[in-house]
Image (cartoon, grey):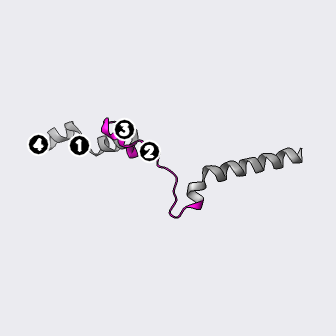
């Protein structure tokens, strides 16, 4: 039982190290940005992140409030 747990832990450690080679062993290494907004092909097609779209919509002024302000 202990041998299986140690083998599993060693295998997991090796997997994490191999996935992070670029991050751990290069100067200024960082994980790749998988955000939709960072993908040039998606931006060219006009596809944006749902979070960014929501933030933009919340910044816009409500049309009803705009009409009420113009009546004053």
Query: Between tags 2 and 1, which lies in front?
Result: 2
Disc 3 to disc 4: CB gap under 8 Å:
no
Magenta residue check for 44: yes
Query: Between tags 3 and 4, which lies in front?
Result: 3
Disc 4 is placed on an element classified as helix
Residue placed under numbered mark 3 in the picture: 42
Residue 70, disc = 4
Q: Residue at left 39%, top 46%?
A: 38
Query: Between tags 3 and 2, which lies in front?
Result: 3
Location of residue 41 (image quadrant)? top left
Q: Residues within 10 Å of mark 1 (few under 14, many from 20)?
A: few
Please report whichever mark, 3 or 2, sits nearer to the chain's N-terminal start: 2
Q: CA distance from mark 3 to mark 2?
A: 10 Å
Residue 35, disc = 2
Magenta residue check for 29: yes
Q: Position of residue 37 (x, y in %)?
A: 38, 44
Disc 1 is placed on an element classified as loop
Judge left or right: residue 15 versus residue 44.
right
Q: Residue at left 78%, top 45%?
A: 8
């Amino acid at each position: 039982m202990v041998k299986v747990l140690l083998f599993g832990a060693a295998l997991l450690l090796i997997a994490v190290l191999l996935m992070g080679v670029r991050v751990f062993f290069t100067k200024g290494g960082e994980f790749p940005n998988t955000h939709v907004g960072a993908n040039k092909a998606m931006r060219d097609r006009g596809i944006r992140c749902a979070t960014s779209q929501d933030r933009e919509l919340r910044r816009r002024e409500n049309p009803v409030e705009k009409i009420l302000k113009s009546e004053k």
